[in-house]
Amino acid sequence: QSVLTQPPSTSGTPGQRVTISCSGSRSNIGINTVSWYLQLPGTAPKLLIYNNNQRPSGVPDRFSGSKSGTSASLAISGLQSEDEADYYCAAWDDSLNGRWVFGGGTKLTVL
Amino acid sequence: EVQLVQSGAEVKKPGESLRISCTGSGYSFTSYWITWVRQMPGKGLEWMGRIDPKDSWTNYSPSFQGHVTISVDKSTSTAFLQWSSLRASDTAIYYCAKRSGPHRRWYFDLWGRGTLVIVSS
């Protein structure tokens, strides 16, 4: 069971806006920043959002992140078929001498 | 080009030893921690541990402590993940990733392509 909680799956139609939640606790999301990773089928994860809401260069502004308290969210607007992938949230956790924790991943299906 | 290049797929038997590698290029290798992440078949990402290439200081997840060893060779800008005795449950893809960002605002901005490890008798 993952330390960060994400819904296992979500779906949307092209053009729609979807959000993916990530719930944690004070020792991780509560006091550290959240990053999001996109994993297309058969490929390595790729950084999508860092520092809660910052996009690396090359990531479309259709992707946005937010954080409030011990939860974070990833929003994808103008959904496209190529957005179909697995999405993971991650944060540093100050418990147990420090560790990285990931969400269990959310499979996004574009209908 | 900034990249992490991982070693190729491995097929091993239970009880055998293994070391896989992750070579960084295009950036100052000793300036950024390297993390190893496991992804079992059809499952999510699990943090295994990290190493500071500058001084080889390591920190492991309790789930992997004692079963794997992370090391680094600064002269070749390479990080390693090794097992002394593999189990069938070690079958997975292993990713290395470069940690960036200021204190408490860390993130993984660069990932290797992954090394598939299959452990089967």
Image (cartoon, coloured by chain):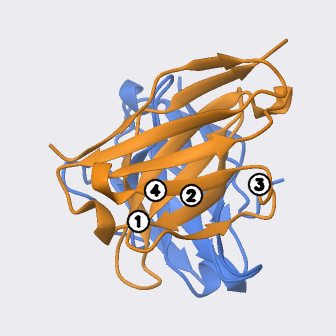
Chain colours: A blue, B orange
Instruction: Evaluate whether label 3 is on the same chain as label 2.
Output: no
Q: How far apart, in angstroms, are the residues tagged by discs 3 and 2? A: 21 Å
The vertical placement of A51 against A104, above or below, is: below
Nearer to me, A89 or B15: B15
User: What numbered label is drawn on residue B64?
Assistant: 3
Q: Are marks 4 and 1 in contact (CB under 8 Å)?
A: yes
Look at discs 2 and 4 and give the one toward the viewer.
Answer: 4
Residue corresponding to mark 2: A89
| Position in image of residue A87 (x %, y %) | 54, 45
Q: Are marks 1 and 3 in contact (CB under 8 Å)?
A: no
| Position in image of residue A83 (x %, y %) | 41, 33
Label 2 SS: strand
Look at discs 3 and 2 and give the one toward the viewer.
Answer: 3
How would you rate the neighbour count of disc 4 (Cα within 10 Å): few for under 14, some for 14-19, many for 20 or more? many
* Residue A47 visible at all: yes
Q: Residue at x 20, y 57 (%)?
A: B27
Residue corresponding to mark 4: B72
Instruction: Evaluate whether label 1 is on the same chain as label 3.
Output: yes
Q: How far apart, in angstroms, are the residues tagged by discs 1 and 2? A: 25 Å
The vertical placement of B3 against A32, above or below, is: above
Amino acid identity at mark 1: Pro
